[in-house]
Structures are given as C-alpha cells and as structure tokens.
Amino acid sequence: MKSSLEKLRNLGMTSEEESKILHLQDYILKVHTCKKSMTDEELFVDIVDGAILLQDSDIMTYDYNSNIEVKDTPDKPLSPSRSFKSSQSTRSLKHQQSIISSQSLDVVPNTGIASSRTSTINSDTVDLTNDPMFSSLNIEIDTTTLTQNTQTDLLQGLLSRKQAEYIRTRRAVKPTLLPGDSWVPKGILVCHIHEHKASINKVKFSAKDSILATSSDDGCVKIWNARRFDSKNIINNSRHTYSRQSQPIKGMAFYDTGDKIAAITRNGSLHEVGVKELKVYAARMIALEPDDVIIDMHTLGIGQEQTLVISTCDGKIIGVDVRSPTAIFKLSNNPSYGASSAMCTDVNEHWMCIGTRSGWITCWDLRFRLPITSWQHDSAGGGILDLKPNPISMSSIYVAVDNSPEVGVWNIESSSKERMLWYGEYEPFQSSSSSNGVSSLLPLGGEVVVTGGIDHVIRYWNTSQHTQSYTLAAPPDTPTTYTYGKKIVKNVEVIYMEAASPLLTSTSITQKDMNPSRPSPAHHQMITDMTFCKATQPFLITVDMGGVMKIWK
C-alpha cells in the first residue's frame, strides 16, 4: 500500500479531481463497506484490463459541482448480492476504488495524521466555520459517519489541504501587516512629496510588490514604489499616474491580489485599472439619485470573487461584483439619521458600519444584508468623521467626531462607549465644542492607534501603556511635551493628555523654539488619511488637503 501511494503521488492531481472526490465521499465509503463484505472470489471476478466505462454502471453521475446522487442508497450497508449483479457493475466499483488509490492526498494511511507535505491549520488564527467565503468552497464532510479506514484518512486529508489552501490565499491577499506596539515611529520625516494638485482623499498600500496608491480631488490616481522611500540619492517621483477620471476621486481600493485598483469619482464613475501597466479593465457608471455623491468604497472577498461596497451621501450602500456590469445588491440607511459621512468594514468582513453627519452609527450584517443596530454618538451634535474597526476586538470600532477632541472606542453589541482618548483643554463629556477634532484614524494593532487631526497634529496613543503615548508631529507654536494619565469618567475609561508642567506651558516650548533654523515637518493642512506600509522598513504615510504626502519612520 505504501509503495503504491508513493508511485501514485507522482501522477499529480488537478483541483477538479480533488473536488470530484469530495462529492463522491458517501459513495466511496459504501464501496469500501461492500468490498470488506465480499469474498475473494467475488472480489477478483471479471477483472478486465483497460478502460472502464462509467455508463455501464448503475450509478447516476453529474457534474462535480452539483450534488452527487446515487440510485441505491439503503440505510444498511449494501450486500454483495444487491451490489454486484453484473460484471459491468463490478468493474465500475473497482474503477471507483482505483480513483481513491490513484490520487495522492499526502496523508499517512490508517493514522489520520497529515504528512509533512500537508499544510496545518491554526484554528485560533482563522475561523473557517463562520467565514462566508470559506463556505463558498462547497466543502462538506460529515466526520461522524466516517470510520477509521484509509478512505476516511484520505478524505480528511483532502479537506485539510483545501482549508490550508484557502488560508494561504486569504493571507496572501490580506496579510497581517499591523505591527502593534512592536514598532514605534520616531517622528522622523523621510519624504515630503507634493505631486497632487488638490486634496488627497485616500492612500492605500498593497503588500504585493510594495505598491502605494493615492487618489485626489484633482482626478488622478498615482502609483508609488514604497521600496524607494528610504533611498538617499533619488527623487521619489510616482511610478504611474492615471488621469482619465476628470472628477474628484472619493474612493479607492486594491483588489485581485493587489494587481488591480478600483477608483470611483464623486459622481459615480468607476474605473478598474491594472497597477503595473494602467490597463483599463472596466469603466462603468454607478447610477445615483440627483444630488447624491460617493463618499467611500471598500472591497470584500478574495481573488477574483470580490465585491466593491460603495457608500453614498444619501445613505445608499451599493455592492458591485468586479466580474459583473450590474450591482448585486442595494441597501439604504435610515434617512432620519442624516447624510452618510464615513464607513468601515470588519476585518473578517462579517459587518460594516455607516456614520452620518448627525452623529448616528448603523451596523449592517454583510452576510444577511440587514441592519443590526443603530445608536447616536454622545458628542454635542458632531458628525462622524472617521470609523475604523478595532483589530483586537471584533465587536468594537474607533470613532472620530467633529467638534470634539476625542476618539471613542464603542462596543457595537451594547452600543456603549468603552474607552475614550481625550486631548481637549476641558473635561470630557462637557458640552463645549472644539474645532480640533480627529479627521483620520489608523489602528496599528494591539492597543495602539495613530490619529491625525483637523489641527494638523499627529498623535500616537498606546492605551495599554498610556505613558508611552506622545505627539508625533505638530505645527509651529503647538506644544509637543505632554503627560498622559488615565481615569474613569461616567463608567468610561479616559486616557487624557495635559501639559507636562506649568513651566513648559508658561514658556511655550514648541518645535520651532527647540530648533528655530529648521522648518516644522508637520502638515500645514488638515490630515485626510493615513496608512502603514512595510517595504524595506516600516513607514507611516500621511496625506492632507493640500495634496501633500509625508512618509515618517
């Protein structure tokens, strides 16, 4: 048996043949049961070399993507007298048996333990049972009906290989790039790039080929090589510029394992372009109501089976399959909650949240496409400026609002605020408003989040070790030396910052005072978006309304 398996491993097996074996699992087990009940004479009768025709058997066969149907499916194991009425059926069953023997599944027989060539699965890392995309693989196996035999081991091994293949594909498309608190940016400006002629709305990073993309109100998408950012003797110009969309680009996302990029304009013009050669794969118009505009776009799924989820100002949520010219679903947020202003999707793509200008947040179930819960932010009427999922908690989000110097961590299930990052001059939960709200959020994994403000300040927050928080970059005449504390206010954990000492406050020590001859590296316009990229080394990328992109390390 061992030598036979080794010989058959060299024959190779396509994915279609693997899928066929999965669909034939019930029939294979019945064949094995019948074989064990046969005598030697019955087992070796009518052996004929050469091709064996399936149409001579009593088995109804269909395409491997359909459900396998077998004519004779009794509750009890098939008896030899019922199963072997003719030499043709005998040959058919032996042919099915030969399929199992001839396909190498890299599993040690009679042990149930995958060999070293089989990828292992870490169930703590990926929840396969609840993932809607894993269910699309059509892998179904009832382990309670399988006996401890070679066929069971082969089927289990095949299932393991399918699961491992799915995990590798998902991680290749969406790798875990967030560094957590293992990387702390020092606030050193590496590059200051000003190619865009208007506000940069989105900046995205693709780990494949270390590509960075920016989209702007000037109607251009620029492609950058992130590996060149730390080079000393070159000018960091963009690699490509796509300028066929004349309207401001409000949404942008990589898809198809990072080889393509989708960009959508304010009026709904959606273009899908190759990253390397800027080849236009599709150009379509998303039908919008009069006076409605696009606010953002995200991608769901992996590989070719991806969906673009588009959010509009009027509360519409539109799903577009990259392979189809028409929308696959259309949802509508409650109009009484106000105009939509921000959106985010869960890391596992089970839900998404929509924020409005009236401070309302609605969570949608992406699997059933139904609203789960809605609640209003407790700020003084501030609109939602940005939403980001919490990487360490699948049921909470970071929320930034206008007119309030805070970042809230909200629990979706209870619709309650669990934590607050506060940098205001007055006490939290007061009705006073501030023009220095947070305009962009970037969770770095763990308990770390970076915020970019309307006040042009970049702040680094470590909620597990709040004393490690600091101001990464600030404009001139802005104090950068603070102390950070923690307290409980209205049953909410508040991490706050205040001036380090009266001496520092009175003397107004700023970046400009520390080094008057060097201009401030901080942004001079409102920060619109941020991302983390790791090429030759980790970088923090920030963009602003003036069309400037800054790279920090």
Image (cartoon, rainbow, N blue to C red):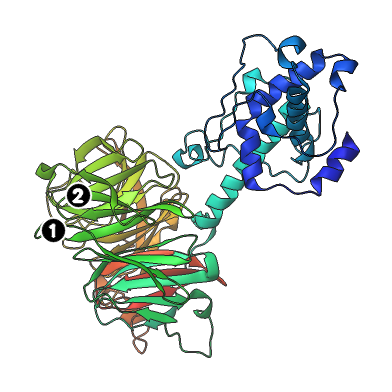
Q: Position of residue 74 (x, y in %)?
A: 62, 11
491 on left or right of 383: right
Q: Secondary structure at mark 1?
A: loop
- Measured along the vertical axis of the image, is residue 97 above or below residue 15? above
Name the residue located 51 percent from the left edge and 40 percent from the top edge: 134
Q: Is residue 481 in sight in this rendering?
A: no
Nearer the observer, 143 or 495: 143
Instruction: Compare residues 250 and 394 and report the one nearer the observer.
Output: 250
Instruction: Estimate the spatial distance between the alpha carbons at disc 2 and disc 1, rounded to whole Å.
Output: 9 Å
Upstream in sequence: badge 2 or badge 1: 1
Quadrant assignment for the N terminus: top right
- Taking 304 as reference, is 428 left or right? left
| 10 Å crowding of disc 2: few (<14), some (14-19), many (20+) | many
Q: Are marks 2 and 1 in contact (CB under 8 Å)?
A: yes
Residue 224 image-quadrant placement: bottom left
Q: Which residue is mark 1?
A: 292
Name the residue tied to disc 2. 316
Q: Residue 248 appears at what percent x and percent y? A: 22, 72
- Considering the numbered disc 2 on the image, is that residue within a helix, a strand or a loop? strand
Residue type, mark 1 in image: Asp
Q: Nearer the viewer, residue 204 or 60?
A: 60
Q: Residue at x 40, y 66 (%)?
A: 261
How many numbered marks does the figure carry? 2
User: At which x and y percent is residue 232?
Assistant: 53, 87
Specify the amino acid type for callout 2: Lys
Pointer 1: residues within 10 angstroms few (<14), some, or many (20+)? Answer: some
Viewer-proximal residue, 512 or 104? 104
User: Which label is found at residue 196?
Assistant: none
Q: Residue 241 at what x, y percent from top left?
A: 37, 80
Q: Residue at x 59, y 50 (%)?
A: 168
Q: Quadrant of residue 288?
A: bottom left
